Structures are given as C-alpha cells and as structure tokens.
Image (cartoon, rainbow, N blue to C red):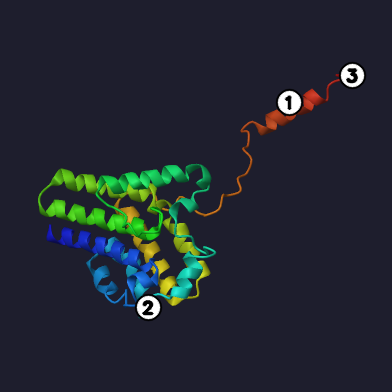
C-alpha cells in the first residue's frame, strides 16, 4: 500500500513538474526545474522508469531554467509548437467550443479553478498537466483515507481526461517541440514529456496520440469496394448506341 501511494505521489509530482516546464519562464523563475528529476523517476512505477531512465541517462539533464526567448518563439508569437490542445484537432474549427466546454466541465467537477489572472485558455498544456497532477493527489488522499469509491472516481476521471484531451494530442506537441527547437532545455522537456505521457497512457489503459498533426490532414477520396465492377458497368453503359441521347 505504501509503495503504491509513493508511486501515485511520484506520478503527480511528474505532472506538476512538466506543467511548470511549459509555463512562461517569468512565471516559474529561473530555478533548476529538473534538479530532482532522477529522484522522482526512481519512485515511479517500473514501466515509467523503463521509458524515462534512458532519456536522463543518454542526454545531459538541463541545469538552470528555460529561456524566455525560446519559450516565446515556440509557444508565443508564431506558435512553432502551439501549446493549445484543441489546435491539434483536424476539425478544430468545428469542435473547439465543445473541447473547451468539456475541459471546463472536468475542472469544475473536481474543484479546479483557473486563477483570475490566468490568461491562457483551458486547453493549455500546463493547465491540463496541472489538473492531472491534482487528480492523482485526490486519488492518493482517497487511498490513504480508505475511500475506495472516491479513489475509483478520481482514477476513472484521470483515464478519461487523458483519453479525451492530453493523451490525444501530447505526442504531436512533443514532436513539434523537439523538431523545432535547438534549445537543450526544451528538447529534453519534449522527450521527457513524451515518455511520461506514453507510460501514463499504458497505465490508465488509454490509446495514446491519435491526433498526429496540428493541421488538417489531406484525406484520400473514399474508395468503393466494388470499384472494378462499377468500372465495367460504367463502360457498358457509356458504350451504349451512339444515338443514346
């Protein structure tokens, strides 16, 4: 039981850490955000460790905080890697309102309120990460208090939230960051984020990353399963007598 709680706390801490990573640097300061990452990883479930340890062992852990210039280039003007989840939906224009309403419904149900000074939309990556961190903390509290029904509700909500939101677009976001940055801090952050969210999807039995791109994909026209028969029929029809008309 204690080990299980430790793993839940470590997962919550990892969500919290990643939420700070993608906030503007002036918000989180210049402290070394990854100073305790190895300890956090050592407390995570074995599947998480298998995905995350190679990342910290094969690349130098960034020392110091994120670059405000690079944060603005990636996530601000120009949006080289947009941090807003609804923008990764190929049907964003039609479904954005529903997505934001669904997010706010989750937040309200679990007492998660955006700060009055908060300028970001509810689908910002840092906000979604912060919410999942809170859900896991609530689950930990319910476990410690023996409130099994409350624990089940929190964990079910975490799985559904991951499936409908962060797990759906997190892979595309990480790919964009890694592909467009030359900053070691954000490159490392993208790899760590991708590995952690993939492990979370497996833990919560969620199919990860079904949104593969932030722009609408070019779809091939639908193909008729009877294409050859239709083609022959068309030939017969339009080979009718020349005075058909």
The residue that disc 3 covers is 243
Q: Residue at x 49, y 67 (%)?
A: 74
Work out whether residue 206 can be spotted. no
Q: Residue furthest left?
A: 145
Q: Is residue 163 above or below residue 76?
A: above
Which quadrant, please, contains the C terminus?
top right
Badge 1 marks a residue whose secondary structure is: helix
Q: CA distance from mark 2 to mark 3?
A: 79 Å
Tags 1 and 3 touching, CB below 8 Å? no
Please give left or right for residue 232 compared with residue 207 in the image. Answer: right
Please give the name of the residue rendered at 44% of the width and 71% of the height, measured from the top-left corner: 187
In front: mark 2 or mark 3?
A: 2
What whole-number distance in Å separates the C-alpha atoms at marks 1 and 3? 19 Å
Secondary structure beneath dot 3 equals loop
Query: Which badge, 1 or 3, is on the more N-terminal residue?
Result: 1
Q: Position of residue 157 (x, y in %)?
A: 28, 46
Give me the disc on residue 152: none
Residue under numbered circle 1: 233
Label number found at residue 62 = 2
């Amino acid at each position: 039981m204690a080990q299980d709680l430790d793993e839940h706390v470590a997962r919550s801490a990892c969500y919290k850490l990643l939420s700070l990573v993608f906030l503007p640097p002036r918000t989180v300061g210049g402290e070394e955000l990854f100073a305790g990452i190895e300890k956090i990883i050592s407390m995570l479930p074995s599947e998480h460790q298998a995905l995350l340890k190679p990342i910290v062992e094969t690349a130098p852990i960034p020392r110091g905080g994120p670059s405000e210039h690079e944060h603005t280039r990636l996530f601000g003007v120009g949006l080289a890697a947009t941090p807003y989840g609804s923008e990764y939906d190929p049907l964003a224009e039609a479904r954005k309102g529903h997505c934001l309403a669904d997010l706010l419904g989750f937040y309200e149900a679990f007492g998660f309120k955006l700060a009055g000074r908060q300028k970001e939309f509810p689908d910002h990556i840092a906000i979604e990460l912060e919410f999942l961190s809170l859900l896991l903390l609530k689950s930990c509290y319910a476990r410690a208090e023996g409130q099994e029904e409350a624990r089940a509700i929190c964990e079910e909500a975490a799985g559904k939230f991951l499936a409908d939101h962060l797990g759906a677009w997190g892979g595309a976001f990480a790919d964009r960051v890694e592909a467009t940055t030359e900053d070691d801090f954000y490159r490392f952050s993208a790899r760590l984020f991708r590995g952690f969210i993939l492990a979370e999807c497996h833990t919560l039995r969620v199919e990860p990353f079904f949104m593969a791109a932030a722009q609408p994909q070019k779809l091939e026209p639908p193909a008729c399963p009877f294409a050859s028969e239709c083609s022959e029929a068309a030939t017969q029809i339009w080979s009718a007598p020349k005075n058909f008309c």
